[in-house]
Image (cartoon, rainbow, N blue to C red):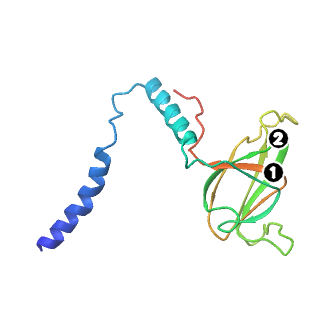
Amino acid sequence: MKKIVIMILAIVLIPLAALADLPDLSGLTFDELVQLRDQINLAMWNSQEWQEVTVPAGTWKIGEDIPAGHWSVRIVGHGITNGWYCEKVDELGQPVCFGAQYIYKEIASEDFHAFKQEYNHVADFDMQEGWYFIVDTPVTFTPYTGKPDLGFK
């Protein structure tokens, strides 16, 4: 019985001890939290673990060509591209959109405007091994750092 109690205490206390090292943010104002978030993002971008990789147009298998994970994707240069993240591709490497799971996103450069439409300038994909990513033009992959700040206070 003592061993069970010790194991339960260890399971509960170890995560709490890890959280004890984190600073208390409850006393910070909104503006201070925004500044802190910006400093954290800059520190992540400057870390040695940060990656920014250009992926050429084509069909790429997740886990072989592109590591599985959550990625932010931007178009290289000016224009618009089509990005598919899908479970299956046909013999030509094109997405199978019927009877399979897929996500389709248009990704445009920040200076691209057409037909008075709004376009995504960054698309995020949470990619799992064995699926495929298909893109029409080169794109840049960076680690996903969270949803963009919409500016609400």
* Left-right relation of 131 to 70: right
Task: Give the amino acid at mark 2.
Answer: Gly
- Of the residues under marks 2 and 1, which one precedes in the sequence? 2
Residue 30, quarter of the rendered image: top left
Q: Position of residue 116 (x, y in %)?
A: 84, 33
| SS for callout 1 | loop
Return the mark for residue 77.
2
Name the quarter where the N terminus is drawn: bottom left
Q: Identify the residue at horizontal 40%, vertical 25% (top origin).
A: 29
Q: Residue furthest left?
A: 2
Location of residue 23 with respect to 106 vertically, above or below: above
Return the mark for residue 10.
none
Location of residue 86 with respect to 51 vertically, above or below: below
Residue 114, quarter of the rendered image: top right
| SS for callout 2 | loop
Q: Identify the residue at horizontal 81%, vertical 51% (top origin).
A: 138
* Left-right relation of 38 to 23: right
Neighbours of disc 1 within 10 Å: few (<14), some (14-19), many (20+):
some
All told, the count of numbered labels is: 2
Task: Give the amino acid at mark 1.
Answer: Pro
Q: Position of residue 113 (x, y in %)?
A: 84, 34
Q: Nearer the viewer, residue 151 or 81?
A: 81
From the image, tell me which residue sits under label 1: 138
Q: Identify the residue at horizontal 85%, vertical 75% (top origin).
A: 91
* Left-right relation of 105 to 147: right
Q: Nearer the viewer, residue 152 or 51?
A: 51
Q: Are marks 2 and 1 in contact (CB under 8 Å)?
A: yes
